[in-house]
Image (cartoon, rainbow, N blue to C red):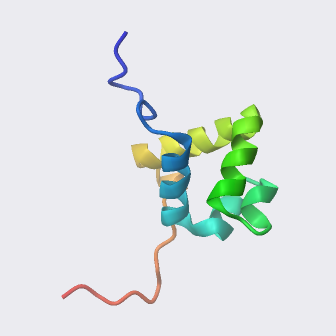
Amino acid sequence: MSQANNPTHGVTLEMMLKELVAAYGWPSLGQRIAIRCFTHDPSIKSSLTFLRRTPWARQKVEELYVRFKSGDAAVRPPVKLFAKPKR
C-alpha cells in the first residue's frame, strides 16, 4: 500500500509538534487547539506525554498539521507585523 498522498507518513508526533510550535508559537497553538498542555507552562516534552496518552488530542494536532501542510488559508500562521523588510 502506497503512502504517497499521506502527509503524515514518516513524520513523528514530535516533528509535527515542533513544526507547529515554530510556525504558530505556543499561545496561538493553544488558541487553535484548546488543550491545557499548550496554554499552561507548555513544553514539547509535557505536550508529547499528554498527546501520546490522549487519542482525541493527538487527532486534533494531526488534523491541524495536515491542514497546515496543505496550505489551508484558515490555518496560516500569523504574519509578523514588525518584521524587517527584505532587501
Q: Position of residue 54 (x, y in %)?
A: 77, 37
Residue 17 placement, left or right of 36: left
Residue 36: name its quadrant.
Answer: bottom right
Residue 54 placement, left or right of 66: right
Residue found at the far top of this picture: 1
Q: Give the residue displayed 72% in from the left and 55% down from the top.
A: 46
Q: Give the residue displayed 64% in from the left and 67% down from the top.
A: 26
Q: Out of 39 and 46, give the one closest to the viewer.
A: 46
Q: Out of 30 and 78, give the one closest to the viewer.
A: 30
**Quadrant holding the N terminus:** top left
Residue 57 placement, left or right of 29: right
**Quadrant holding the C terminus:** bottom left
Q: How many marks?
A: 0
Residue found at the far left of this picture: 87
Residue 24: name its quadrant.
Answer: bottom right
Q: Out of 45 and 54, give the one closest to the viewer.
A: 45
Q: Out of 75 and 46, give the one closest to the viewer.
A: 46
Q: Position of residue 34 (x, y in %)?
A: 77, 54
Residue 21: name its quadrant.
Answer: bottom right
Q: Position of residue 31 (x, y in %)?
A: 71, 62
Q: Give the residue displayed 62% in from the left and 58% down from the top.
A: 44
Q: Give the residue displayed 47% in from the left and 56% down from the top.
A: 19
Compared with 7, 45 (above or below) is below
Q: Position of residue 51 (x, y in %)?
A: 70, 43
Compared with 31, 80 (above or below) is below
